[in-house]
């Protein structure tokens, strides 16, 4: 007990540790209790932070910050416009076609399952297949009801999207344009001696910057490779599946395992256990292997990789707290925790 008491006394005697603790508590409190309310602002901060790297790159060429901000901002708006009016309609079309084909897919799956008792009567019985089919039909019915409830609430969703489309571009521009003024204003509330916070932020900024840039190019590379392979082999819904595979790299380990299921199922429903099916699966596994063993080491050579156990733990914790967004931001948040743990002992043992 005395050891714990002495430890707390040591921490409380270090103003840097106290300030860092209060800062982290306030940060997570805002995310937990006000995250939904401040979602447009938080999203704008994240996007402005990601675009800051491009602004600095243009500034190194001798361009003024305001002009660099305008150039990057216009390029960002052009990119978003291409996504909304170029990629989204195609994804929406393929998603609609996929949903419409689900009943025929279920019928083909039921036919294949009913053949199992004939081939393997000692392992699978007809009653078990019937129970499995009832369970699948129940799940599909529940999914249909969820989709119906989403469509009923689509008006509210449209309003939220409009708010994002109007507010976020404005917030992003002013966050980029007045970055230094905002940083100075926030820094005015910090004590003069905040070296520990500066050290943690420098580590987090370097790691997250490398991580985000690497993930962006990894998504583009994996998406393009899958799109070329799926289109060349004639796989249905090639764009939709390629986008899913590309986005899945944001969720280490879990994403690749989950997205493999629809790719394999669509290929099986289209070709069955034929030569085309095995070629598609082989090419897909090769792409996944190249991603994990070639692309990732090249893109993330400067990033201190977290242990797989730490990554999975972060996905479980932050995903449980914030859902899908928590899963996507699990690695950056885990990097923040890792940076704090790395900086904390040195500052406690040798306070400045």
Image: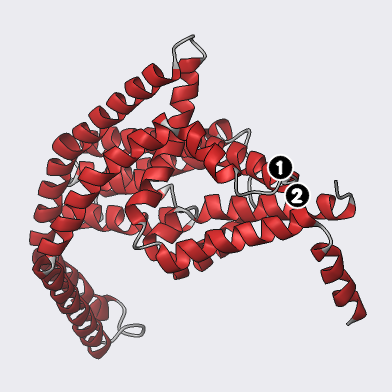
Q: Secondary structure at mark 1?
A: helix
Percent coordinates x, y for residue 203 in the rendering: 66, 41
* Residue occupying the far bottom of the picture: 127
In the drawing, does residue 47 fall left or right of residue 242?
Answer: right
Q: Secondary structure at mark 2?
A: helix
Residue 312 in percent (x, y) is at 55, 61
Tag 1 residue? 199
Whether residue 293 is visible: no
Give the farthest residue toward the top: 62
Q: CA distance from mark 1 to mark 2?
A: 7 Å
Q: Residue at x 9, y 53 (%)?
A: 97
Please say if 153 is above or below 279. below
- Which of disc 2 and disc 1 is earlier in sequence? 1
**Looking at the rendering, which quadrant does residue 79 occupy?**
top left
Residue at 20% x, 86% y: name it.
130
In the image, what residue occupies the spot 59% across and 39% down?
A: 205
Q: Nearer the viewer, residue 83 or 61?
A: 61
């Amino acid at each position: 007990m005395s050891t714990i008491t002495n430890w707390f006394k040591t921490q409380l005697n270090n103003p840097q540790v106290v300030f860092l603790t209060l800062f982290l508590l306030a940060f997570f409190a805002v995310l937990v209790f006000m995250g939904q309310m401040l979602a447009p602002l938080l999203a704008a901060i994240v996007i402005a932070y990601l675009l800051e790297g491009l602004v600095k790159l243009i500034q190194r060429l001798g361009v003024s910050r305001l002009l660099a901000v305008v150039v990057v901002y216009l390029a960002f708006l052009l990119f978003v416009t291409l996504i909304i009016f170029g990629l989204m309609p195609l994804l929406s079309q393929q998603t609609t076609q996929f949903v419409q084909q689900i009943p025929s897919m279920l019928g083909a799956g039921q036919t294949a399952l009913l053949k199992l008792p004939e081939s393997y009567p000692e392992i699978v019985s007809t009653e078990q297949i019937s129970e499995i089919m009832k369970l699948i039909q129940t799940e599909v019915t529940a999914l249909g009801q969820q989709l119906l409830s989403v469509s009923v609430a689509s008006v509210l969703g449209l309003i939220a999207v409009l708010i994002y489309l109007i507010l976020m571009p404005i917030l992003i521009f002013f966050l980029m344009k007045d970055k230094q003024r905002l940083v100075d204003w926030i820094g005015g509330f910090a004590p003069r001696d905040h070296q520990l916070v500066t050290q943690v932020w420098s580590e987090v900024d370097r790691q997250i910057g490398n991580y985000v840039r690497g993930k962006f190019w990894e998504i583009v590379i994996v998406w393009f490779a899958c799109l070329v392979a799926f289109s060349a082999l004639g796989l249905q819904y090639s764009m939709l599946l390629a986008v899913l595979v590309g986005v899945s790299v944001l969720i280490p380990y879990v994403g690749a395992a989950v997205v493999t299921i629809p790719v394999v199922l669509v290929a099986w429903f289209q070709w069955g256990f034929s030569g085309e099916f095995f070629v598609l699966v082989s090419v897909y596994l090769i792409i996944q292997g190249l991603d994990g063993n070639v692309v990732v080491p090249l893109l993330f050579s400067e990033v201190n990789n977290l242990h797989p156990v730490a990554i999975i733990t972060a996905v479980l914790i932050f995903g449980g707290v914030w859902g899908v967004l928590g899963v996507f931001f699990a690695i950056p948040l885990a990097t923040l925790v890792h940076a704090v743990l790395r900086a904390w002992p040195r500052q406690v043992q040798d306070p400045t």
